[in-house]
Image (cartoon, rainbow, N blue to C red):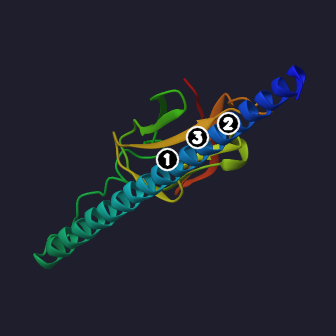
Amino acid sequence: MEAGDIATWVGVLITLGISVATYVQSRRQARIADEANIASQEQVEAAQRRAVAVEDSLAEALRLLAERGLTEAPPTPAMSGGPGAVRWNLERRGKHSYLLRNVGTATATGVHVDRNRATPIVRNMPENATVRPGESLQFLMAPTFGNPLPGEVWVVWEGQPEAISVPLP
């Protein structure tokens, strides 16, 4: 065996070691990403359960008011403030994390962000969410080599037939 052969075998072993380490690291990252997706889905489901509970308690309160003979019920948050009472603000919360906040005075229901106008890499985009005044929805959006971050996201909710542009910070 010549010196060149030894150097070749050492190079092959080093390359093999790097390949194995890269594979192990990629599997670890995939597992972490799966765990993060599961955790975020659980958070979404908990928020939806809270929203349903609040809506049920509001319906019960309105029913009790009607039983007591009050002819005029107080306006629901979605109705107060008139047209245009839902307003949006987008806040950056990390390298790829954003908060879509309702800075208006009314509750927005059926909120979703138009995925067709967003970057290809998005996670936890709002779909059919309920957002009360001051509340926010968190999602992830990352640029790719072929698709940079857009200048805005497009939001639609019940009572708003056309998507509204919310600029990225």
**On the image, numbered disc 1 is attached to which residue?**
32
**29, above or below 53, in the image:** above
Q: Nearer the viewer, mark 1 or mark 2?
A: 2
In the picture, measured across the screen, residue 47 lies left or right of residue 70, that is: right
Q: Position of residue 169 (x, y in %)?
A: 54, 23
The residue closer to the viewer here, 41 or 30, is: 30
The amino acid pointed to by label 1 is Ile
The amino acid pointed to by label 2 is Gly
In the picture, measured across the screen, residue 56 lies left or right of residue 17, that is: left
The amino acid pointed to by label 3 is Gln
Badge 2 density bin: few <14, some 14–19, many ≥20, Cα 10 Å: few
Q: Looking at the image, is mark 3 or mark 1 earlier in the sequence?
A: 3
User: Label 3 to label 1, Cα distance in Å?
Assistant: 11 Å
Judged from this view, the residue extending furthest toward the bottom is 67
User: Label 2 to label 3, Cα distance in Å?
Assistant: 12 Å
Residue 17: give its label. Answer: 2
Q: Looking at the image, is mark 1 or mark 2 earlier in the sequence?
A: 2
**Are the two marked residues, 1 and 2, in contact with CB atoms closer than 8 angstroms?**
no
**On the image, numbered disc 3 is attached to which residue?**
25
User: Label 1 to label 2, Cα distance in Å?
Assistant: 23 Å
Q: Nearer the viewer, mark 2 or mark 3?
A: 2
The secondary structure type at the circle numbered 3 is helix
